[in-house]
């Protein structure tokens, strides 16, 4: 070992060549090389620039050094970005070159020498513990890594182990759903995630439920329920029978459509394992009607929602009728008596209005025998057994003028209107029935429909039965609302009240709803469209925010270049200011996808559009909003070690593409301190040049440059800039850093090689 150490010292003609910072070095497995390699490095206590996410040391001296042991992994290769490639005579030269480079953490070394008697040696920017998926067998090379405390696999549940080899410690970077020093503890609710991440940004989080990972969209911040992290449990569609009062899902522990728990406040029904696993002290109930979201929240201690509902026992609440009616808005309607509310609310007559969670009421009687009105979730019973979530009310409710359904009183011989029915021979509409009768002819069938305020069309038998009568089905909807259920059928004819919807006024596959009282209609737009006839495509999250007035982050379909694109619109103030923000790009500083010279900055090609649905995570994306969405504000965010930071500024543009694609420099005036906020206390820049904006390049294009950001130099010009903070980075001193902070050559807060996950959203 003495001769080896002496040989290494003799090679280091430049003192900097023997410098080796001691963070982020890791152990290879298989078996160790039988030697130790010494590099001369300063004691960290002697360094004034000890604050660093990576290694930061001064030139070595002959008095202070540490020993590093390399482990050999035969016939393996680690495929990560290189910090350099050299040719060497043997393994000692290769590992010494690694120790001499502060960005090197492991090496790949050729198995056999080339024509000149040398071996190629790749100096690697990471190790196999952080990049296990890129560590593979390879017949042409061996892999060498510095011995690490991570070799004992202390981090559990597929966490990543990161070494600090200044002091021989390590840190576990937990995968979603786990926490703790060794990532040994599971996250069981969004409240825990909110406390852990300190974030008001709604995001996908993996919870461990029944010892099984379940990924859901945690709603963070105050979107209408109050501040904090809210765990989704169920989404119920009032037009479907899935979660009818009598459905088994209320009493069992079976999930339903778990992926629906990832998509926010949309129309995908779901029942998650949180229904029977997640204890709570508050519950928030929401209803969306015509795109408008409304919430009510109240305190309730329970082991789970299942514990309140599954046994069918009535458990009272005391919110009051006006609070429950807030879920409906101005149209809310209830009868005046009984006034029973809570969980498993059922009157004395179980065939009438009831709700798993909600409020039921009666007309003038002093009991709960014949409740004909309700607001709630898991509904059932008359007057509309098909309404499983919402408001059903008849027989003198308190708001006759408003109803979510057709709400005339039964017709009489003195007061009725004439309706013209259109006949559709040999067709059948398969929707929930409001009744079945036997009649002598089509006139009786139509009259029974007109006499029932919930009937909008009928199916009538094509031929009479044994008793000379026809069966007649009274239907709760029409073919315009339920076009997919309208089909040919040899045994029946379909009759529907003449409707203005017959001319198909609603565009882009929207649903046409008729108001049979006055002959008007309303278009319920498909995702991505708005306007009276659903003729206008929605192009930004700001339009969605202005349309629905919701502060809840949600998946929204935008229409860009006549093509639907679904994105997660970030609503409310999560760090960029109030309103709605349209996602444009997400950039991983460790990857080359969006480096300065990437074609993605100049072209109009999308990249991984699905990444636009997943919020502030590590999935890179470039969306069509990059070249389609105009804005007046831009917000830039970086995530470093789980910490999100944002800066926002005013900038009018037709699109981000219009600012960056042509390569022209366009200045901003935020100042160095504002840009450094993206990094936090570790931010570092040189003191001169101070050029910022879009397409920021000094006079030497081989040095630091960014598509959006800030560059600086230690000299009094912009020729050889060695520091930058920004997005779409490139050039020395670290060309591999596409997003984050790179700084060398006397910056104001020490050398930095910080790679961040970057986010660009606009408004």
Image: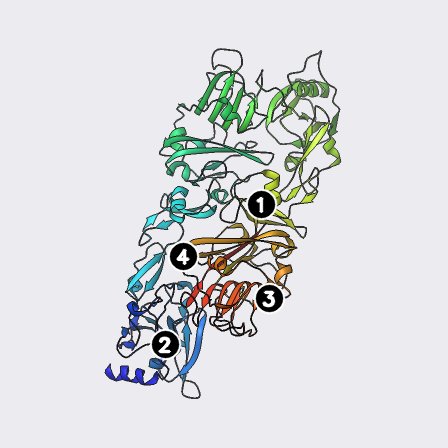
| 3D distance between C-alphas at marks 4 and 2 | 26 Å
Q: Is residue 44 visible?
A: yes
Position above or below: 221 against 605: above
What is the quadrant of the N terminus in the image? bottom left
Mark 4 vs 2, N-terminal side: 2
Q: Residue 579 versus residue 393: which sits nearer the camera?
A: 579
Q: Secondary structure at mark 2?
A: loop
Q: Position of residue 554 (x, y in %)?
A: 54, 44
Task: Indicate the quadrant where residue 62 lies.
Answer: bottom left
Position above or below: 42 against 238: below
Q: Residue 496 versus residue 171: which sits nearer the camera?
A: 171
Q: Are marks 1 and 3 in contact (CB under 8 Å)?
A: no
Q: Please name the residue shown 73% across and 37% down the image.
A: 504
Q: Please name the residue shown 71% across and 13% down the image.
A: 415
- Side of 64 relative to 375 (left or right): left
Q: Please name the residue shown 33% across and 53% down the image.
A: 183
Q: Position of residue 403 (x, y in %)?
A: 61, 24
| 3D distance between C-alphas at marks 4 and 3 | 29 Å
Mark 4 vs 3, N-terminal side: 3
Q: Are marks 4 and 1 in contact (CB under 8 Å)?
A: no
- Side of 753 relative to 514 (left or right): left
Q: Which residue is mark 1?
A: 556
Q: Which residue is mark 3?
A: 599
Mark 4 vs 1, N-terminal side: 1
Task: Indicate the quadrant where residue 419 lies.
Answer: top right
């Amino acid at each position: 070992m003495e001769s080896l150490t002496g040989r290494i010292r003799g090679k280091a003609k430049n003192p900097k060549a023997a410098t080796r910072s001691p963070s982020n070095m890791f152990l290879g497995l298989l078996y160790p090389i039988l030697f130790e390699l010494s590099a001369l490095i300063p004691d960290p206590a002697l360094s004034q620039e000890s604050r660093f996410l990576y290694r930061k040391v001064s030139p070595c001296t002959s008095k202070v050094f540490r020993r590093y042991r390399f482990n050999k992994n035969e016939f393996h290769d680690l495929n990560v970005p290189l910090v350099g490639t050299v040719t060497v005579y043997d393994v000692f030269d290769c590992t010494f070159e690694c120790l001499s480079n502060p960005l090197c953490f492991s090496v790949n070394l050729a198995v056999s020498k080339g024509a000149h008697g040398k071996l190629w040696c790749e100096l690697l920017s990471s190790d196999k513990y952080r990049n296990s998926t890129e560590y593979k067998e390879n017949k042409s090379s061996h892999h060498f890594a510095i011995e690490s405390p991570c070799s004992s696999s202390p981090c559990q549940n597929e966490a990543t182990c990161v070494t600090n080899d200044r002091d021989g410690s390590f840190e576990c970077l937990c995968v979603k759903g786990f926490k703790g020093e060794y990532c040994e503890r599971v996250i069981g609710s969004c409240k825990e995630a909110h406390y852990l991440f300190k974030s008001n940004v709604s995001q996908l989080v993996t919870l461990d439920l029944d010892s099984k990972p379940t990924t859901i969209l945690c709603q963070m911040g105050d979107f209408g329920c109050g501040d904090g992290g809210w765990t989704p449990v169920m989404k119920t569609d009032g037009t479907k029978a899935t979660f009818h009062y009598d459905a088994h899902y209320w009493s069992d522990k079976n999930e339903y459509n778990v992926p629906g728990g990832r998509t926010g406040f949309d129309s995908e029904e779901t029942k998650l394992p949180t229904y029977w696993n997640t204890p709570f002290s508050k519950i928030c109930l929401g209803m969306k009607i015509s795109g408008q979201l409304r919430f009510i929240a109240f305190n309730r201690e329970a082991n789970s929602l299942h514990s309140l509902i599954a046994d069918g026992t009535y458990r009272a609440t005391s919110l009051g009728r006006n609070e429950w009616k807030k879920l409906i808005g101005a149209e809310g309607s209830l009868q005046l008596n009984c006034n029973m509310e809570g969980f498993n609310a059922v009157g004395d007559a179980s065939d009438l209005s009831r709700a798993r969670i909600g409020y039921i009421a009666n007309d003038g009687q002093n009991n709960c025998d014949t409740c004909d009105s309700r607001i709630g979730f898991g509904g059932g019973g008359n007057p509309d057994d098909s309404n499983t979530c919402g408001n059903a009310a008849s027989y003198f409710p308190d708001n006759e003028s408003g109803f979510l359904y057709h709400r005339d009183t039964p017709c009489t011989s003195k007061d009725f209107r004439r309706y013209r029915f259109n006949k559709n021979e040999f067709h059948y509409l398969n929707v929930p029935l409001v009744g079945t009768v036997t009649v002598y002819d089509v006139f009786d069938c139509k009259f029974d429909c007109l006499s029932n305020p919930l009937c909008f069309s009928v199916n009538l038998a094509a031929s009479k039965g044994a008793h000379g009568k026809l069966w007649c089905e009274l239907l709760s909807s029409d073919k315009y609302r339920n076009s997919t259920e309208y089909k040919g059928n040899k045994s029946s004819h379909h009759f529907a009240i003449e409707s203005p919807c017959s001319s198909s006024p609603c565009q882009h596959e929207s649903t046409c709803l008729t108001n049979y009282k006055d002959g008007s209609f309303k278009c319920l737009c498909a995702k991505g469209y708005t306007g009276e006839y659903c003729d206008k495509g929605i192009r930004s999250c700001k339009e969605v925010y202005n349309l629905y007035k919701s502060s809840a982050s949600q998946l929204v379909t935008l229409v860009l270049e006549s093509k639907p694109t679904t994105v997660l619109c970030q609503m409310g103030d999560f760090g960029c200011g109030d309103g709605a923000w349209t996602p444009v790009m997400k950039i991983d500083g460790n990857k080359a996808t969006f480096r300065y010279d990437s074609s993605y900055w100049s072209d109009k090609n999308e990249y991984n559009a699905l990444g636009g649905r997943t919020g502030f995570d590590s999935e890179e994306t470039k969306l069509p909003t990059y070249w389609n969405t105009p804005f007046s504000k831009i917000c830039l965010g970086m995530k470093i070690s789980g910490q999100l930071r944002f800066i926002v500024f005013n900038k009018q543009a037709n699109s981000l593409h219009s600012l960056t694609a042509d390569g022209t420099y366009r200045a901003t005036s935020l100042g160095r301190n504002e840009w450094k906020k993206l990094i936090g206390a570790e931010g570092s820049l040189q003191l001169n040049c101070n050029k910022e904006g879009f397409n920021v390049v000094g006079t030497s294009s081989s040095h630091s440059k960014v598509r959006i950001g800030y560059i600086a130099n230690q000299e009094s010009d912009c020729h050889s800039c060695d520091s930058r903070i920004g997005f779409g980075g490139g050039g020395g001193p670290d060309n591999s850093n596409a997003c984050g902070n790179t700084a060398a050559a006397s910056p104001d807060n020490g050398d930095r090689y910080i790679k961040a996950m970057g986010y660009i959203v606009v408004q």
